[in-house]
Image: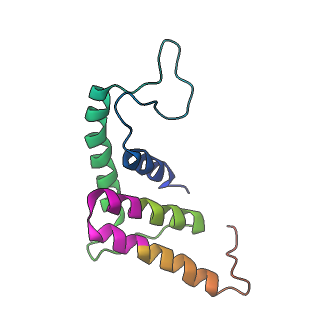
Amino acid sequence: MKILSPFAVSLLALSAGLAPGAEGPPVAPAAGQTGVVSTEALAAFKPKLRATLVRHHDALLGADGAVAALKGKTAEGEGALSLYLLFEQTGEQKYRRAALALADQVLRDMRATKFGVLPIK
């Protein structure tokens, strides 16, 4: 279950701060499009993206700041990255604490195995 992967990618795009007029994501533009993000479109999109990401991540955090159970090491690793990137964007320590807790959980699970390799589920 890859619940956070698209959010991590969105946060990376948001933190990259695409400059107005700079080329957009590395995908082929549709016919008739230039692949350039307009200043107005970028300015309108960033607050919407940030609000969506904050709302999603807040839904994953409990009142005590604990992260909801995620299935699998990939989800936990991507969740940790996504939460840390959101911390960098917002400066809110709750996201940093949650990211570190998830990363620590993955490391704890790895250390508990014989060779430090988590099973693929």
Image quarter hosting the N terminus: bottom right
Q: In this view, does 26 lie above or below 34?
A: below
In the rendered image, residue 97 lying in the magenta stretch gets the answer yes
The structure residue drawn at horizontal position 49% and vertical position 67%, both measured from the top left corner, is: 70
Q: In this view, does 76 lie above or below 14?
A: below
The percent position of residue 81, horizontal first and vertical second, equals 47, 62
Magenta-highlighted stretch: main secondary structure?
helix
From which residue to which does the magenta span run?
83-99
The percent position of residue 89, horizontal first and vertical second, equals 31, 56
The structure residue drawn at horizontal position 46% and vertical position 32%, both measured from the top left corner, is: 24
Based on the displayed image, in which of its 4 quarters is residue 37 positioned? top left
The percent position of residue 100, horizontal first and vertical second, equals 42, 75
Q: Which of 54 and 3 lies nearest the eye of the viewer?
A: 54
* Visual colour scheme: rainbow
Based on the displayed image, in which of its 4 quarters is residue 94 positioned? bottom left
Q: In this view, does 55 lie above or below 67?
A: above
Looking at the rendered structure, the number of numbered marks drawn on it comes to: 0
Q: Which of 71 and 7 lies nearest the eye of the viewer?
A: 7
Indicate left or right for 4 with 41 as reference: right
Residue at the extreme top of the image, as rendered: 32
Indicate left or right for 101 with 28 as reference: left
Image quarter hosting the C terminus: bottom right
Q: Which of 98 and 35 lies nearest the eye of the viewer?
A: 35
The percent position of residue 98, horizontal first and vertical second, equals 37, 72
The structure residue drawn at horizontal position 49% and vertical position 35%, both measured from the top left corner, is: 25
